[in-house]
Image: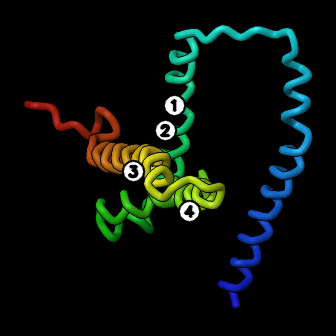
Amino acid sequence: MRILLLLIVAVVASSSSFVVHVISAQWLPEWVSSQMQGVHIQPSWKVKYVALISSIEYGVAAVALYALVREKLIQHGVLFAVVIFSLLLTAIHGAFIRQPLMDYVIGNPLQVVFAQNAFKWLVWLLMSTVVIIGYEITRQMPTSDCDVKQPV
């Protein structure tokens, strides 16, 4: 019974975000277009630097999330933890099933769907690998100067 209730929670959660997406997709592009009339945007290399610096948000969130789920994942080994954590991150971003399915449904050939999404999957696999291995390495390090044995 609990699984059924959790499935209902998942459906309602997904539906609520989908409804917001659909509603905003109906009026937001037109509103943005009206706000941008007469505004000229010049691409700049500075955007890449801001994107690089602000991308730390993903890393911080991934480390925090792993810290919360670590006990359940790591008991099965590092490889298992990396695979499951990367699948979770990918799915949370809708890039595991939803985006490839939508890319295919709109008419992209299967090889295009795979190429478009393989890089997204790679991003989350690499992030998971770095987060988990890095987190596990830091757990083996001394936490304070008192933990380090000083030579006599």
Element class at badge 2: helix
Mark 2 neighbour class, 10 Å CA radius: few under 14, some 14 to 19, many 20 or more: some
The amino acid at mark 4 is Ile
Q: Is residue 26 left or right of residue 108?
A: right
Residue 145, horizontal then vertical, whole percent: 29, 32
Above or below 32: residue 97: below
Q: Reading the chain from its start, which is encountered first: label 1 or label 3?
A: 1
Residue sitting at x 71%, y 70%: 10
Residue sitting at x 91%, y 22%: 34
Q: Is residue 68 visible?
A: no
Distance CA(mark 1)–CA(mark 4): 25 Å
Above or below 56: residue 94: below
Q: Reading the chain from its start, which is encountered first: label 2 or label 4?
A: 2
**Res. 97 mark:** 4
**Res. 56 mark:** 1
**Res. 59 mark:** 2
The amino acid at mark 3 is Leu
The amino acid at mark 1 is Ile
Mark 3 neighbour class, 10 Å CA radius: few under 14, some 14 to 19, many 20 or more: many
Q: Reading the chain from its start, which is encountered first: label 1 or label 4?
A: 1
Element class at badge 4: loop
The amino acid at mark 2 is Gly
Residue 76, horizontal then vertical, whole percent: 33, 70
Q: Which residue is mark 3?
A: 125
Q: Is residue 72 left or right of residue 20?
A: left
